[in-house]
Each structure stands twice: as C-alpha cells, then as structure tokens.
Image (cartoon, rainbow, N blue to C red):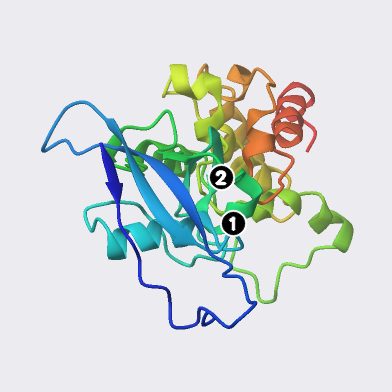
C-alpha cells in the first residue's frame, strides 16, 4: 500500500527567492502498520514527505499524522530525548525518533520505521510497555534505608556519587531491553534497563537494600541470562555503559562487595 501527498510548506519555509534553493527534499517513510481491529497481520505502508533533512524522524511522523493519515499511532511527549516515549526501530536499529536526524539516515533510500521488538504491538508503533515496567518495579528502584527518619540530609561524597552516576541517566525508553536477543526469546528476563536501575541503587552508599536487590537479580530470569552481546550499550540513546553495569552487578553477586 502506498500513500503520497503534497504538503503545504510551513510558513517558515523560505520563499522561492531567485537563486535560492529550497532546503526541502522528498523522503520515503516506510512504516510498519498494525491495527488489530482490521487484521491480525502487519503491513508496510509508504509515505512521500517533503521535509528539511535537518529535521528529525519525529517531525516526519508528525507531518504524516497531521497532514496525510491521522490514524497513524505512535508515542511521543517531550520531543527532546528526555522522556523516552518515542523509542522505535528506525532503519533496523533502536533509536529515539526525536533524536534521529533525516540527514543521518541516507534519505535517498526509504526510511523504515517499526515498533521495538520483544513487546506486544498494540497498534502501529505502540507496544505494551507493562512487562517492561513490571521488571523495573520488581528491582525496587527507590532508596531503602532502615532506622529512624534522619534529621538532616544523607550526605554523600563526590566519589561515592560517581560510583553510580552513569546509571542515573536511564530514561526508561526500553531501547536497550528491546534490542536484547535474550529478551526477544524469553520475555521473563528482567532485561538490561531493570538491571541498570537496580545497579543505580545497589551501588548507592546511602541505600541499605543492596543484598535484597542482588538476590532478586540472582533469579534464573535475572542477571545471569545476559550473554554480553553489547546490543544494549549500542542502543542506549543516553550513552550508558549498560554492559559494564551488568558485569558489575554480576561481580557484586559473586564477591558480595558493592
């Protein structure tokens, strides 16, 4: 199925002044569509979009939804790479649509857009995130302490903070977890994102539930399922060294030092 439309150029587009070339190019967006109310099978649909190559894939999806096909369904929120809502597979790789520029994707060829893998597709590019968030909740991603409520802040040295600084960057986009072949084949695996968020508290000097979290991750569906393929690290839009964090959790389980 193919859809083509001519979009009105935005008001900010330069008028065709003599000798001034338009910055717009025509790009083919090839999107995997799925509507359970229509069919049990997904299909590919092409859209021809006039767009500035310096714009993002998210901008292209907006043009399609607003001007061509309002039924196109996808998640997005802040559009600045912070909320993690718009993770999807773009040209076969997990990325955030709001951080992926058209010019970086070889726009001379169709740009393929499909939902992330390993999670049930609800409609078009939207997947059921509940299993992902359940794994996140299971590792108790919050500070746990004992005793009486403190009368002043819990102080921490810069060195202690640095110990887990990298894993505080997670935005729960699921790009790492849905790039993991172990997760594709067994949805019971906690997945990289849950382990990263457990790491953030296991190595926090103020927390007192490290042992408890380690026992949770020592389960058959826990950290030992990792096969160190580095897919997760490559997929992370925040540049977190996920594979390194997983190895540190494994080491803590063996040595009980953290």
Which residue is pictured at 75% across the width and 30% down the height? 252
Q: Nearer the viewer, residue 210 or 7?
A: 7
Furthest residue in direction left, as rendered:
37
Q: 254 left or right of 85?
A: right
Q: Mark 2 highlights which residue?
A: 95
Q: Position of residue 27 (x, y in %)?
A: 48, 50
Q: Which mark is residue 109?
A: none
Q: Is residue 144 visible?
A: no
Q: Position of residue 17 (x, y in %)?
A: 57, 83
Q: Position of residue 151 (x, y in %)?
A: 66, 76
Q: Mark 1 highlights which residue?
A: 99
Task: Locate the N terminus by quadrant.
Answer: top left
Q: Quadrant of residue 126?
A: top left
Q: Is residue 104 above or below residue 175?
A: below
Task: Locate the C terminus by quadrant.
Answer: top right
Furthest residue in direction front, as rendered:
18
Furthest residue in direction right, as rendered:
159
Q: 101 left or right of 256?
A: left
Badge 2: residue crowd in 10 Å (few <14, some 14–19, many ≥20) = many
Q: Are marks 2 and 1 in contact (CB under 8 Å)?
A: yes
Q: Nearer the viewer, residue 145 or 37?
A: 37
Which residue is pictured at 76% across the width and 34% down the height? 244
Q: Secondary structure at mark 1?
A: helix
**Count of numbered labels shown in the rendering:** 2
Separation of marks 2 and 1 at Cα, in angstroms: 8 Å
Q: Nearer the viewer, residue 239 or 56?
A: 56
Q: Position of residue 9 (x, y in %)?
A: 42, 73
Q: Is residue 188 visible?
A: yes
Which residue is pictured at 61% across the width and 41% down the height? 198
Q: Secondary structure at mark 2?
A: strand
Q: Quadrant of residue 227?
A: top right
């Amino acid at each position: 199925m193919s859809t083509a439309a001519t979009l009105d150029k935005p008001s900010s587009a330069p008028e065709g002044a003599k000798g001034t070339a338009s910055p717009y190019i025509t790009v083919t967006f090839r999107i995997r569509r799925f509507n359970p109310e229509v069919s049990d099978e997904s299909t590919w649909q092409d859209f021809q979009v006039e767009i500035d190559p310096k714009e993002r894939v998210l901008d292209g999806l907006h043009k399609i939804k607003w001007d061509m096909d309002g039924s196109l369904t996808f998640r997005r929120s802040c559009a600045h790479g912070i909320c993690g809502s718009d993770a999807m597979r773009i040209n076969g790789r997990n990325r955030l649509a709001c951080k992926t520029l058209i010019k970086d994707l070889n726009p001379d060829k169709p740009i393929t857009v499909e939902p992330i893998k390993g999670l049930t597709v609800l409609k078009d590019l939207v997947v059921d995130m509940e299993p992902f968030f359940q794994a996140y909740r299971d590792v108790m991603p919050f500070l746990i302490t004992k005793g009486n409520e403190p009368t002043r802040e819990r102080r921490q040295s810069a060195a202690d903070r640095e110990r887990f600084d990298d894993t505080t960057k997670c935005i729960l986009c699921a790009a790492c977890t849905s790039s993991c072949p172990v997760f594709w084949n067994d949805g019971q695996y906690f997945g990289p994102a849950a382990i990263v968020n457990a790491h953030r508290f296991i190595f926090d000097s103020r927390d007192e539930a490290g042992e408890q979290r380690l026992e949770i991750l020592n389960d058959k569906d826990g950290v030992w399922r990792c096969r160190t393929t580095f897919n997760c690290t490559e997929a992370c839009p925040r540049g977190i060294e996920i594979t390194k964090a997983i190895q540190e959790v494994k080491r803590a389980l063996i040595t009980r030092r953290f």
